[in-house]
Image (cartoon, grey):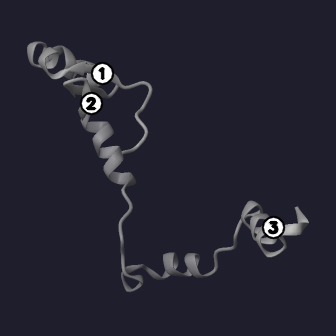
Amino acid sequence: MGKMDPNLFEVSAKEVAGRLGFYTDEAMLRPVGIQKHGVTRVVMLSLNEYERLLRRDRQAMLTRELDDETLDAILTAEPGERSQEAGRRLADPGAG
């Protein structure tokens, strides 16, 4: 399981059931972790945050589905300086 957000507002399912309106309003401001038997099992969040997360999901695509500009950008990409330095260290562990 992933690392839990330290800003997650955690409450019991029983508490949420009794004050749903309050917690849906709270979820508009920050994620609300809903616990059952002391374990967070569900997170309530705003629609905007949910849609943002959906946009961030990685999508697997076939290269034939890419437009020419994107495919060219991938084929001609150069590694950044940090990647190049890491490559040099891997190639010559004694170098530092």
Name the residue tied to disc 1: 10
Q: Residue at x 42, y 83 (%)?
A: 63
Q: Are marks 2 and 1 in contact (CB under 8 Å)?
A: yes
Residue occupying image coordinates x 43% and y 39%: 3
Q: Is residue 90 above or below residue 33?
A: below
Q: Given the image, on which type of amino acid does mark 3 rest?
A: Arg
Position in image of residue 79 (x %, y %): 70, 70
Q: Which amino acid type is shown beneath numbered disc 1?
A: Glu
Q: Earlier in the sequence, mark 2 or mark 3?
A: 2
Q: Mark 3 highlights which residue?
A: 89
Q: Quadrant of residue 20?
A: top left
Q: Which comes before the other along the chain, label 3 or label 1?
A: 1
Name the quadrant containing residue 93.
bottom right
User: Along the horizontal axis of the image, is 89 left or right of 39?
Assistant: right
On the picture, is 73 further left or further right than 45?
A: right
Q: CA distance from mark 2 to mark 3?
A: 42 Å
Where is residue 85 shown, x and y percent of the image?
Answer: 80, 65
Dot 2 surroundings within 10 Å: few (below 14), some, or many (20 or more)? Answer: some
Query: What residue does disc 2 label?
Result: 40
**Is disc 1 placed on a helix, strand or loop?**
strand
Q: Secondary structure at mark 2?
A: strand
